Amino acid sequence: MVLSLCTLRGRIAGILAAITRKITVMRIEEDLKLGFKDVLIRPKRSTLKSRSDVELERQFTFLHAQSTWSGVPVIAANMDTVGTFRMARALAEFDVLTAVHKHYSVEQGAVRQRRA
């Protein structure tokens, strides 16, 4: 197969352009990545006499809504066996939030809110 010099130059230019695009898109991240096995959380010394003295409830003020919420800053998962309305009612007694599973419709959520 015989290629003219112009055709060869065009193909080489196209290949170089493609390589250059790929090089500029590639990004090397040098941030430190840690997994669960890499981190050890050690408890801090405390002046509390008993674990029953621990207060988990916190008060949050939302910046743009100008409202506050007081409760335990824990959210139950939105898995199909955890994020149920029954679980939300049980955890609401302890001021714990629940992310409701996606298989519930908006209407079911509205009915649940009216009952609460």
Image (spheres, rainbow, N blue to C red):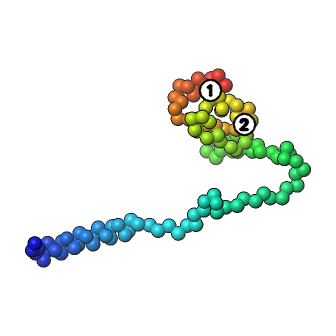
Q: Residue furthest front?
A: 37
Q: CA distance from mark 2 to mark 1?
A: 16 Å
Q: Percent x, y for residue 78?
A: 58, 39
Q: Residues within 10 Å of mark 1 (few under 14, many from 20)?
A: few
Q: What residue sits 64% from the left and 63% below the top?
A: 38
Quadrant location, the C terminus = top right
Secondary structure under the numbered disc 2 in the rendered image: loop
Q: Percent x, y for residue 115?
A: 65, 22
N-term-proximal mark, 2 vs 1: 2
Residue 6, can we see it? Answer: yes
Q: Which mark is residue 113?
A: 1
> Label 2 belongs to which residue?
95
All told, the count of numbered labels is 2
Q: What residue sits 29% from the left and 67% below the top?
A: 18
Left or right: residue 95 versus residue 22 is right
Q: What residue sits 38% from the left and 68% below the top?
A: 24
Q: Residue furthest bottom?
A: 5
Q: Residues within 10 Å of mark 2 (few under 14, many from 20)?
A: some
What is the quadrant of residue 114 in the picture?
top right
